[in-house]
Image (spheres, grey):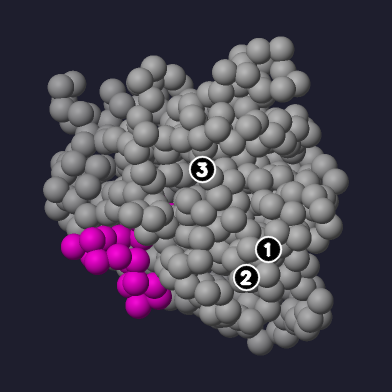
Amino acid sequence: MMNVKIEDSQPLDFKISREKTALLMIDFQGDFVDEEKGFVAAMGGSVKDNQKALGPAQRVLMAARRAKITIVHTLEAHRTDLADLHESKDRRSRPSPDHKIIGQDNGNGRMLTRGSKCNGLCPEVAWKDGEIAIHKPGKGAFYGTELLARLQYLGITHLIFCGCTTECCVQTTMREANDRGFDCLIVHDATASCLERFHTETIGQITAFGAIIGCAACAESVIQAFEALEMIPSTPTLLNNNDNISLPIVDISSLMTLVHIPNGHKARSFVSPEILNTADEIGRACRTLGFFYIVGHEINSAPILSAAKALFALPQHEKIKLKPLGGGEAAGYEPSGAQVLDEGRLGQGIDGSQTKNQADLKESYIIGKSVPTQRMDENKDRLEGRWPNFVAGYDNINSFRSVLECYHDQCENLIARGLMRAIALHLGLAADTFDASTLNSMTKLRLLKYPPCDNQEYANGAPGCGSHVDWGALTLLAQDEVGGLQVNAKPGVWIDAPSIPNALLVNVGDLMHLWTRGRLRSAPHRVLKPKLTGVPRYSAALFFNCDHNALIDPRLLEPNQILDHSKFDFSTREKEGGCLTAEAYILQRVAGTYHK
């Protein structure tokens, strides 16, 4: 590790290295830079000085990227439900007592609210994939966020600050960092205040008494130091050219801390370096194969697989009574041949080997939380289902039902509070990014039975389950040891996904592939005839599809004012100013896989 000195650092020398330095870009969002439609404008302030800092800050940012410095963007931004907005802050952020500002639309989206255009980062200093975005509910970036854990995880010791406003969010964050043992430097011409004297006074306060809070330097000196770091060779990344592809196994024990905290914005304070490491393991798997195993999840899958065997052992005439009244993917029993999953709408494409429109051999039994407009049960129970009168091996139907409902709820909590939060962290976002979209999510718990390998239909070319991608956000699968599941690892390459003791299998669905604009992979998979002779295959899949009214809007995941559509054509509706809801997308996909 080599250090480089920032030449005009005052009042002390300030040396940096690539490995231990982070650039913090504080609050370059429309709320504080937009002249007419942001928070400052609504409060009656001027943003002209803040705008002057954009040019130097942009040059510092570009140099940091070339030097491969860790980059952190902060945004003063509240959840869309304002659950992290204190009453006192709301009251103090009003030009008059009856004039509410935070969360209100000032013509360019809701002010200081995540996902709004006015809350997005200015295009000159926009966030990029691989950089960190800290949505902070307060002035300082350490309060109520994951920032400390992120810096500890990366081994950062030195922080360089650009941003606005100098006397408020920049200074507050610097003081928080100073108290936590970080060495800090402010780039004085890449920071600004609404009033010039506030800026000048704050720089003096920061550097007084021998850099009591931190040092100061000009943008040009910082850029020269970054350029010197750029010339130092970085450690090369070793590529794995091993053709023996296998699905990764991720121990999520550390993640269970978040699973047990229902309140998302409070969960952010419990994020640790260990959780971030787990999140990155999950994220890498989601970006590459789209499938991975998890262990350490605290879910026992044996009862649900036993329930599946018992349910499918019912006489056929009893199972037929459980068929849904209408078509499509409704709760109840689906006989073999009801669904065709090679519908030709795959996010990543397949090798084309399957015969088109050949029905699946699997049997299914479904319970869950359906799309609200599609519910067909009269009782309107929390979980929709068409229940048998009796299942062998259970004292009564309620004991059978409790096994399914308990497993459903465990899986839903694990996905919503654990895996979705981990994905948000891997994407460089707040742990609770998806929480407002997963309050009462659409789900399907599908029990599955595939016929034994000697079934004649396999010889005729029928699949147990056709090549397809899942439609929703994430799928959690428990399976027995019979085998037959395969994953399309890359074009033309299918790999087995066998049962692993105490492990559940997770895969990304098309909804997340779209929402992340292709950063997460929705991988094709299929079930061929079982590996073991003479025994059927049983499995249980929990399909998690987010809330029915969740907007699949990339602005929630990319905190910029302007999206680059050249990267991934998200959807025509998004470009026209609207967004798909999760409900609309799921219904669209379901319609293509059932016989009319």
- N-terminal-most mark, 1 or 3: 3
Do the numbered discs 2 and 1 sit on residues whose CB atoms are within 8 Å? yes
Residue in front for this viewpoint, 98 or 332: 332
Q: Which of marks 3 and 2 is nearer the N terminus?
A: 3
Q: Distance between the residues labelled 3 and 2?
A: 21 Å
Q: Main secondary structure of the magenta part?
A: loop
Q: Residue 351: x and y, percent? A: 57, 80
Tell me where the magenta segment starts and ends, as one range: 555-576
Element at label 3: strand
Disc 1 to disc 3, how far (Cα)? 20 Å
Q: Mark 3 points at which residue?
A: 334
Amino acid at pointer 3: Glu
The residue wearing badge 2 is 460
Q: In which quarter of the image is residue 80?
A: top left
| Left or right side of 586 for 429 | right
The quadrant holding residue 234 is bottom right
User: Residue 402's x, y, as percent?
Assistant: 63, 19
Residue 10 shows in the view: no
* Nearer the observer, 120 or 339: 339
**Given the image, on which type of amino acid does mark 2 rest?**
Asn
